Image (cartoon, rainbow, N blue to C red):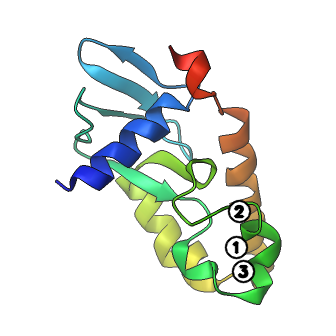
């Protein structure tokens, strides 16, 4: 597993109020469906746990998504990342991400997921 991906996964868990650290690592819930997801202490995802880019990377260059992306430094901004189960993440990728930001339904789903992530936001200082 790439060290960069493991680092991002750990940073996402650290900033998620639903994520709990114990001797097994980080336990949390999928941003979409609330299925249990998690990471080992070194950041290796449990089987079925993925890194979700809420606003898809492919949307960052599209003018229709500018209202969503202007708050982020990059697609890997922690406010744009969440832990998700593979089923939800891949399903979103096949339907919502592909539809693009000009699609009203796709835009609504992404806005709702951003709101869910914001509601689960924890500063790093709070996690210690």
Q: Secondary structure at mark 2?
A: helix
Callout 2 touching callout 1 (CB < 8 Å) = yes
Q: Earlier in the sequence, mark 3 or mark 2?
A: 3
Foreground of the two, 18 or 94: 18
Answer yes or no: is residue 59 visible.
yes
Q: Circle 3 sits on which residue?
A: 101
* Distance (Cα) linking label 1 and label 3: 6 Å
Q: Is residue 52 positioned above or below 26 on the image?
A: below
Residue 35 visible in the picture: no
10 Å crowding of disc 3: few (<14), some (14-19), many (20+): many
Q: Where in the figure is residue 118, as x and y percent of width and height?
A: 72, 41
Q: How many marks?
A: 3
Q: At 22% from the left edge and 32% from the top edge, which residue is drawn?
A: 42
Task: State the SS at label 3.
Answer: loop
Q: Position of residue 21 (x, y in %)?
A: 38, 17
What's the residue at 64%, 86% (across, down)?
Answer: 61
Label placed on residue 106: 1
Q: Is residue 27 left or right of residue 92?
A: left
Q: Secondary structure at mark 1?
A: helix
Q: Going from the N terminus, do you reach mark 1 or mark 3 first? A: 3
Give the class, few, some or many, for how many residues have Cα within 10 Å of label 2's Cα (few <14, many ≥20): some
Q: Looking at the rendered structure, which numbered label has been put on residue 84?
A: none
C-alpha separation, residue under disc 2 versus residue under disc 1: 5 Å
Name the residue at 62% across, 66% down.
55
Task: Characterize the local packing of mark 1: few (<14), some (14-19) or many (20 or more) Cα atoms within 10 angstroms.
Answer: some
User: Residue 109 shows which numbered tag?
Assistant: 2
Are the two marked residues, 3 and 2, in contact with CB atoms closer than 8 angstroms? no
**x, y (%) of residue 89?**
45, 59
Measured along the vertical axis of the image, is residue 7 above or below residue 113?
above
Foreground: 108 or 70?
A: 70
User: Which corner quadrant of the image does residue 35 belong to?
Assistant: top left
Per the model, the C-alpha gap separating discs 3 and 2 is 10 Å
């Amino acid at each position: 597993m790439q060290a960069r991906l493991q680092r991002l996964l750990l940073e996402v868990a650290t900033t998620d109020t639903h994520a709990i650290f114990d001797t097994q690592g980080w336990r949390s819930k999928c941003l979409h469906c609330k299925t249990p997801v998690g990471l080992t202490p070194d950041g290796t995802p449990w089987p079925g746990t993925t890194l979700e880019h809420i606003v898809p990377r492919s949307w960052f260059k599209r003018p229709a998504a500018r209202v969503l992306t202007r708050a982020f430094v990059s697609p890997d901004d922690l406010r744009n990342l969440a832990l998700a189960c593979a089923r939800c993440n891949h399903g979103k990728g096949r339907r919502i991400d592909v539809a693009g930001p000009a699609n009203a339904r796709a835009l609504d789903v992404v806005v709702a997921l951003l709101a869910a992530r914001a509601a689960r936001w924890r500063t790093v200082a709070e996690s210690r």
